[in-house]
Amino acid sequence: MLRARTKGQTTLEVVILIGFVVAALIAMGVYMKRGIQGRLRDSTDQVGEQYSARHTSSEYVTTTGMTQMENITKGGAIETVISRNIQKKAGSETIADFDQEK
């Protein structure tokens, strides 16, 4: 009779111990998640200001130049040769302060 009580008590102790371990893992998971999110935020903050259509204004002028030569052969066929294709982009982009709401 004494042995039956000891066996049940051991099982209960193991179940309670497993419960504590599971609770500790769940609690630790929350703090691990917060830590990972904090490190990710720090990394993105170090990159600098990110593009946002609401906070960014830009003005660019794109100039495209091309040199094209066409040769017409005796049979009437046209041969087109593009010897130079240039594209230049000049302008500016301004990022407003993200802390200010418009």
Image: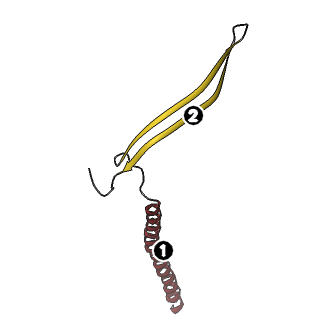
**Residue 81's x, y, as percent?**
66, 23
Does residue 54 appear to the left or right of 34 in the view shown? Answer: left
Residue 73 against residue 63 in the figure, above or below: above
Nearer to me, 60 or 53: 60
Q: Residues within 10 Å of mark 2 (few under 14, many from 20)?
A: few
Residue 94: % across, % down: 38, 49
Residue 25: which disc? Answer: 1
Distance of label 2 from label 1 (alpha carbons): 61 Å
Identified by mark 1, the residue type is Leu
- Relative height, residue 29 to residue 86 (above, below): below
Which quadrant of the structure image shows residue 98?
Answer: bottom left
Residue at 64 percent of width and 21 percent of height: 69
Would you name the residue on which mark 2 appears? 86
* For discs 2 and 1, the disc positioned in front in the rendered view: 2
Frontmost residue, 56 versus 59:
59
Query: Residue 82, position in %: x, y?
Result: 64, 26
**x and y percentages locating residue 21 in the rendered image:** 49, 78
Residue drawn 52% across and 31% down?
A: 64
Q: Amino acid at mark 2?
A: Ile
Q: How is the image coloured?
A: secondary structure
The residue furthest bottom is 2
Q: Secondary structure at mark 1?
A: helix
Identified at 73% across, 8% down, the residue is 74
* Number of the label disc, if any, that sits on residue 85: none
Image side of residue 50 versus residue 98, left or right: right
Q: Residue at x 53, y 86 (%)?
A: 7
